[in-house]
Image (spheres, rainbow, N blue to C red):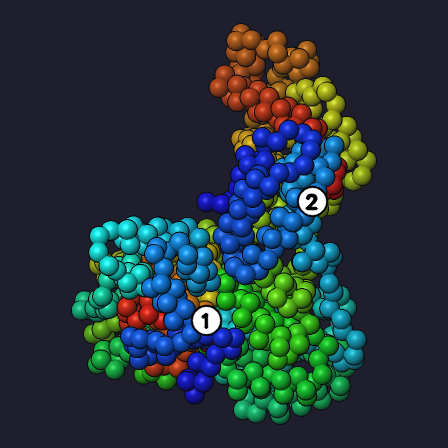
Amino acid sequence: MLWKHTIHIQGSENMSLLGFLRTGLTKSRNAFFRKIGELLKGSKGIDEVREDLEETLILADVGVVTTEKILSELENRLNGAGEKDPLEELKDILVDILGGEDVPDIDTCIRPYVISVVGVNGTGKTTTIAKLAHMLIRKGKKVVLAAADTFRAAAIEQLKIWGERVGATVIAHDLGADAGAVAYDAVNHARARGKDVVIIDTAGRLHTKHNLMEELKKIHRVVGKVVNGAPHEVLLVIDATTGQNGLMQARVFKDEVGVTGVVVTKLDGTAKGGIVIPIRYELGVPIKLVGFGEGLEDLKPFSPRDYVEALLS
Amino acid sequence: MFENLKEKLGKVLKNISGKGRLTEKNVEEAVKQVKLSLLEADVNYKVVKEFISRVKEKALGAEVLQSFTPEQQFIAILRDELVRILGEKKEDLKLVHRPSYVMFVGLQGSGKTTTAAKLAVFLKKSGRRPLLVAADLRRPAAVEQLIHLGNRVNVPVVVGDRKDLFKIVAEAKETAESRNHDVVILDTAGRLHIDDALMEELAKLKELLEPDEILMVVDAMVGQDAVNSARRFDEILDLTGFIVTKLDGDARGGVILSIRYITGKPVKFVGVGEKLDALEPFYPDRIASRILGMGDVLSLIDKIQQQMDAEKMKKMEEKFLKVKFDLEDFLEQLREFRKLGSMAEILEMIPGMPKVDLARSEEELKKTEAIICSMTKEERRNPRIIDYSRKRRIARGSGTTIQDVNRVLKSYETLKVMMKRLKKGRGLFKKFGIPF
Ligand SMILES: Nc1nc2c(ncn2[C@@H]2O[C@H](COP(=O)(O)OP(=O)(O)OP(=O)(O)O)[C@@H](O)[C@H]2O)c(=O)[nH]1
Ligand SMILES: Nc1nc2c(ncn2[C@@H]2O[C@H](COP(=O)(O)OP(=O)(O)OP(=O)(O)O)[C@@H](O)[C@H]2O)c(=O)[nH]1
Ligand SMILES: [Mg+2]
Ligand SMILES: [Mg+2]
């Protein structure tokens, strides 16, 4: 079923990232890749292919500013001594930006480990929580979900359905209830029952809405009172289709609630999620997970190398 | 970073004297700034390239008119080109059949379900009898979501047996006819444009319903990929238009330009909040300035027009334009503008206006009022005579400080200078429809 998603629709540049993310392919062999590769090999510098590279990166939502920085870094590296393969250099630059060869891990050693999942509306927070809970439960963790989106219609029902499917306890109040109180109860429940992880589903909110950002801070303060240092993890969910606004989202969420990692969702589409590059580059926020479908298995730790291979394919 | 395109264009184009043609070199520079700004607003790279080359062509051929500075001329060309793509005027729904079917389609999480409920509210207000249909059987609790929303706005929701999409649609048709609903709004599951099976499902629904409107709901924050999904949905369904949601944030919304350019289909509504009344008809001319990052010149006019009657407007125009602009006029302006939102906010909407710190709050306005009212008539008419000892007296009389008095006088001076600039730029403002 999922493999169907990788059908190309308008030439190779739109190929889905899914294949790469699922299998971690290291080499791709489609036309566009060869074009860039060959152009780079045949050229003396990157001057001749600068526009192609610029186009590739900008079309992936990397943004003008970061694209320019990356390309001048590439120029610098190629001007240095020795024969270098420009394409491999470019990949290395991107991998470096994204945190190197290591694949990040969410270490839920502390008990209960409290994860708050935040982001603008409709990015995939609730679905990601279900997938993450599934991942942790499979590792033998006991997971509690907090239905702290008390605002959106049927958000609570949605989380309950997921909770049932993955086998996680869901702590919920009624629609319109205080979100902080729900989170508080969930963390208390986890502490009392010796559960390992609490994941808080928060309502989608635009980073520009001051009062909603304050509400989020309050949720975090409240759980911090139950468990020292909670929330231990604040995951910002970014939709792969997001353009330059993603950087503003990340900046504000980081400043306001101390984001510890980013989850990029919907990478099973044709969007490449390149906004994570400036997010990491400009703000230093690590990318931790990738989502690539609506099923429970469609979540993986973020591998910078795999991602870059997919991006430049 | 590219927020202030207007300023940058100003710098690039200001060296040219008032008359004559735009030259190749400065157009090149200006065009580069526009390109950056559009990319920053998420307009698709390829669309930007084509757009830019048109603007360049036009700008080089254009004769700079007497009343325009080259900068103004360039911006006018830019704006005209934008509006040409975006469409001249707002496009309404075309609900011709009875009952009339409206299908909502789009990627996951774009806002379909919420917007379906919003449209029901909108139509109800205009005297229609809408019916909602929960045709998303995939997302957990999607049906409950629509039921909640329907309840909230008092619009019935057809749910069916929750298993067979086509049965639900048949039931919706029946309900619409038997209960005399004249518009039926169908909320479908979010799906990827490359999911052939699910796209096929939409095509079948379309065949079954023969909808008057098939609206693709698009998130305003979407980047470069928007053209791919919009194109595919349009290819398969021959959309009648778009609804762009989440414009209440700070996304510049370049996606609007991209999808219109690629499909030629109009944006009919925009979503500006999570509340169910946060849906507005789309006015193409107004979004142009937002995409360009130049301040929403046209919304400003609208705001002013809505809240001031014509006569007052004329008086105001006279005030704006008369050489004499004293502190009494200043106070009156402040009071007038308070009605419209803060003065500074209004002025910021006008391209090229420097930021001024004017009475932003009611409290500050009261203070300003007290200060001006503590002046003699003579002082108000001729502020230049206000020396240190007069300031001290005014401060005492108004219960404020000398700093406060200075601040008011400075604001007044700034505004006066701006009035002069507005006068000089009159041609441009006329063109944009601003009445001063
Ligand atoms: N194709 C695809 N769809 C996804 C992915 N993640 C989530 N979705 C879908 O995106 C839509 C929104 O997901 P939610 O999890 O409800 O998003 P949310 O951020 O919780 O939304 P709000 O709470 O309303 O802000 C649903 O239709 C999900 O099935 C993904 O990785 N790929
Ligand atoms: N701020 C803001 N949020 C909006 C707007 N329109 C929708 N939303 C929010 O966006 C999120 C997703 O909205 P839905 O209506 O569930 O989106 P959908 O397209 O039906 O999602 P799927 O059915 O999962 O594909 C919700 O949190 C909505 O409240 C808008 O104009 N502004
Ligand atoms: Mg949610
Ligand atoms: Mg929906």
- In the visual, does B84 lie left or right of B152? right
Location of ligand 1 given as a quarter of the image: bottom left
**Residue beneath the point at 44% across and 80% down:** A6
A165 is higher (above) or lower (below) than B8: below
The alpha-carbon separation of the residues under discs 1 and 2 comes to 36 Å
Task: Determine whether label 1 and label 2 are within 8 Å by CB.
Answer: no
Q: Secondary structure at mark 2?
A: helix
Quarter of the image for residue A236 reads bottom left
- Three-letter amino acid code of the residue under disc 2: Gly
Front residue (pair B322, A203)? B322
**Residue beneath the point at 53% across and 16% down:** B395
Q: Residue A313: x, y in percent?
A: 38, 71
A222 is higher (above) or lower (below) than B318: below
Residue pointed to by mark 1: A13
Residue pointed to by mark 2: B61
**Residue beneath the point at 61% across and 11% down:** B384
- Dot 1: chain letter: A
Q: Is residue B112 visible?
A: no
Front residue (pair B134, A223)? B134
Q: Residue A192: x, y in percent?
A: 23, 72
Asked whether the residues under marks 1 and 2 belong to the same chain, the reply is no
Q: Is residue A10 visible?
A: yes
- Three-letter amino acid code of the residue under disc 1: Glu
Quarter of the image for residue B317 reads top right
**Residue beneath the point at 49% across and 45% down:** B2
Q: Residue furthest left?
A: A109
B304 is higher (above) or lower (below) than A26: above
Front residue (pair B233, A120)? B233
How packed is label 2: few (under 14 Cα within 10 Å), some, or many (20 or more)? Answer: few
Give the number of the disc on residue A62.
none
Q: Residue furthest right?
A: B311
Q: Residue A1: x, y in percent?
A: 43, 88
